[in-house]
Structures are given as structure tokens and as C-alpha cells.
Amino acid sequence: MTATIPANIAVNSDRLWASVQETAEIGATAKGGICRLALSEEDRRVRDWFRAACEAAGCTVSVDGLGNMFARRAGRDATLAPIAIGSHLDTQPTGGKYDGIIGVMAGLEVLRSLDDAGLQTHAPLELINWTNEEGARFAPAMLASGAFAGAFTADYALSRADRQGVRFGAALDAIGYRGDAALGHPLSAHFELHIEQGPILEAEACTIGVVTGVQSIRWYEARLVGSDGHAGATPMRLRRDALLGAARMIETAHRVAKAHAPDAVGTVGMVECKPNSRNVIPGEVFLTVDLRHPDDAVLARMDAEFRDAVAEIAEMDGLELTLEQTWESPAVHFDADCIAAVREAAAQCGFASRDLVSGAGHDSAYIARVAPTTMIFVPCAGGLSHNEAESATQDDVAAGANVLLRAVIETDRRLSGQ
Ligand code: GLV
Ligand code: MN
Ligand code: MN
């Protein structure tokens, strides 16, 4: 193996695209997306695929106690912490083929391309499949990368339960992916390729987003309790309708976000209504709230406004309200050297690039706490994501992978002191 980097080194675009499309069969939905919830049978199958592909590429695969998977390719200096490339293979229930997946598949393609070029890096490389990035089955999102970075304890992660009451730990055991590697180890850097999940790159005909950070996120769970009652015989003035209160809360989340336009967003994504019978006044509602803003201070103001408004709603509608903030991921600013490596790599490849702050949460947001980190975005059609119709082009995915390859090589050159 040689240490010299060929100037024309590039990933194999067709092989990368084939990996993305082959794994998209695991959990494929009728509408062309993927349903591959964390620690499901589909997740087990894609993990098996990932392990086999990484071993075939000469990597040693280890798994930690939360199911995070690490495929290590040896470097010349085994004493250096690895340069990591990570993302996730779990999806939303109606997820697309690209969110998270291109980050892992592009990482695999980087390793394969280095093999093709007969190139050994100075530092080891590590391709990571982080567990439960989406937070769709087990809240919060980015749970296992967060634990790797020390934001959560392993016990906290293992004790999270899905809406059916199945614990993360039990689900991990059921698919056979509770490994014995220690939780957390040094990384020299962490890079993640991802679709933008927003409309800016496509609108500006820009191929590469150089991601400077991730916005601040808060998640809440609310329970409204009123009283079940007869839909025909209970006069309007005597009702304590929990779903009416929930409707007002949904409107409030939107109003608070709009009051902090253009950057704030607010979403109620999950509502469970009891008893959910058409002629019973709903006596109990559970709902989730997601508020985000790039600035922690503005998000704190949104939090206060939201809390005040929903307390008034509960009072007005005669409901008992429990509102719990279940997660906070503060705004993240990525590493200047990693950002420079991505910007330079995009320029070397001749791709138009621009800086972006991520609206979505990513494993990189937590890993940035323990290693120099950044992300690379590529466009997705219409900015659509968390949707089965999510789509990205082969050329854009390959462009992102080439930028990833060069950013990793440049970071390795810096680490080697050359
Ligand atoms: C993760 O997909 C998030 O931003 O919620
Ligand atoms: Mn993602
Ligand atoms: Mn996602």
C-alpha cells in the first residue's frame, strides 16, 4: 500500500449507488421509501448487510453495548485515534432512501475506493453506523451517539421505551446487536455526508453544503386529561374535551414558531387520543412537540411563550396538563479545520458550495462534543425528507462522497504532520 494520494482519486459512483439501492430493499415500502425503525427486524437485516460488506472490505467490525457499529480499517500508525465517517441506517416509519443511508454507504465507498487505489492512511479509519438516530421508535433522537459522547448514560439509553412499552435494551437483545465494545473511544475527527433535507441547495443549483452547525432543538411530551362523555347528551358548556385542548396546543406551537420567523419551526408530530371512539368526548390526549431555532436564546424564549400559552389553554378548557421537556439538543458549531477541509475538497472537485446550518438533528451534533466534526450536505428534490418520496441524484450523492473522500484524506495528511 502507498501513502501517495493520486490527484485524480474518486469514488466509484455506480458501486455507491448500487449499495444505496440494494439496502433500500430492506424495509422497502410500496410508495418507494423505507420503513426500518431502530432495532427492528429490518434494522437487524441491514446491520448484517453492513457488517458483511465492511468485513469484505477488510475491516474489523465491533459493536458497543448500545448497538453502535464500528468498522475499522487499519492505518499506518495504530496509536492514532481513527478518523471516523458516521451516519445511520434506521429510518422514519415513512422514511426515504437517503436520510442517513447515504452517509453510511458513502463511508463504505470511501473505504472501498482507498482499497482500489492501494492507499493506506496514516490514521486508522472508522466507519460508524449509529443506533437510533431518528428517535422515531425510541425518543430522543441521536440517542446512541449521544451516549457515546457522554450526553446520556448507557442505562438511560437502554431504558427508553417505544410506544408499545418495549425497552431499547430488550429490542437490542432481540436483534442480537448488544455488543461488548466499551461505550465511547477517542476519534481524531468525524465526518458525515447527508442530504440537506431542506430546499436551499436545489434552489441555488449548489452541489455541496458545507455545514457549519446544527440548530437548537427541544422535545416535549404533553398529556391533557379531561373527561370522557357522551357525544350526544353532554351540553357543550359541561365538556372537558382533551382533544380540543390538544388542537389549541397544536395551533399554539405553530403560532409561537411563526412569531420567530423566518428561522423558528414548531411541530406536533404524534397525537394519541383516548378512547378514540367517534361518539365519545375524548378524555385524554398524549402529544409530542418539537420546537427548533438556530439560536439557543431565541429557543428559550419560544419555550417560555409556549408554556404560558398552553397553561392558559388547560385552564380555559378545564383540563389537567402535564408538560415535560424530554430532550434538549443545544445549538452546535462545527470544527473550523474540518469545515475548511470540506470547503477545500469541494473546490478541488470543482463543485459549487455554500455554508449551511442544519435544520435537522444529526449524530454529528453529539460527536462534535468529543471530536472535531463537520458534515457535508447534498441536495434532495424539493427539499423533501422524512417522506417516502425523498429523492437525490446519483451524481449528487457521488459528489458528496468525493468531497468526503478528499476531506478525510486531507485530515489524515494534517494528522500525519506532512
Ligand atoms: C432527525 O431526523 C431530526 O432532525 O428530527
Ligand atoms: Mn438523518
Ligand atoms: Mn431523519
Image (cartoon, rainbow, N blue to C red):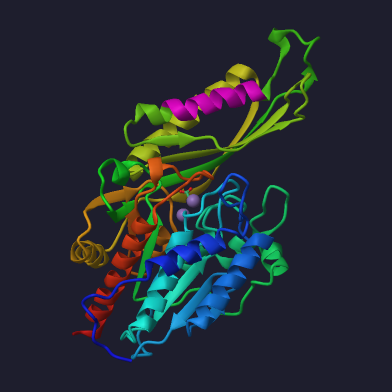
On the image, the x and y values in percent for residue 289 come to: 53, 37
Question: In the image, what residue occupies the spot 25% across and 62% down?
Answer: 339
Is 245 located above or below residue 11 in the figure? above
Q: Point out the residue furthest to the front here.
A: 14
Question: In the image, what residue occupies the spot 38% across and 46% down?
Answer: 359
Question: In the image, what residue occupies the spot 59% across and 21% down?
Answer: 315
Front position in the image: 86 or 204: 204
Relative to residue 341, is residue 26 drawn left or right?
right
Residue 189 sits in which quadrant? bottom left
Does the magenta segment cover residue 241?
Answer: no
| Quadrant location, the N terminus | bottom left
On the image, the x and y values in percent for residue 342 come to: 25, 64
Tell me which segment is drawn in magenta. Answer: 243-255
Residue 87 seen anywhere in this rendered image of the structure: no
Front position in the image: 272 or 209: 209
Residue 264 sits in which quadrant? top left
On the image, the x and y values in percent for residue 78 come to: 38, 90
Main SS, magenta region, reads helix
On the image, the x and y values in percent for residue 101 come to: 48, 60
Q: How many marks?
A: 0
Relative to residue 275, is residue 127 drawn left or right?
left
Residue 382 sits in which quadrant? top left
Residue 52 seen anywhere in this rendered image of the structure: yes
| Quadrant location, the C terminus | bottom left
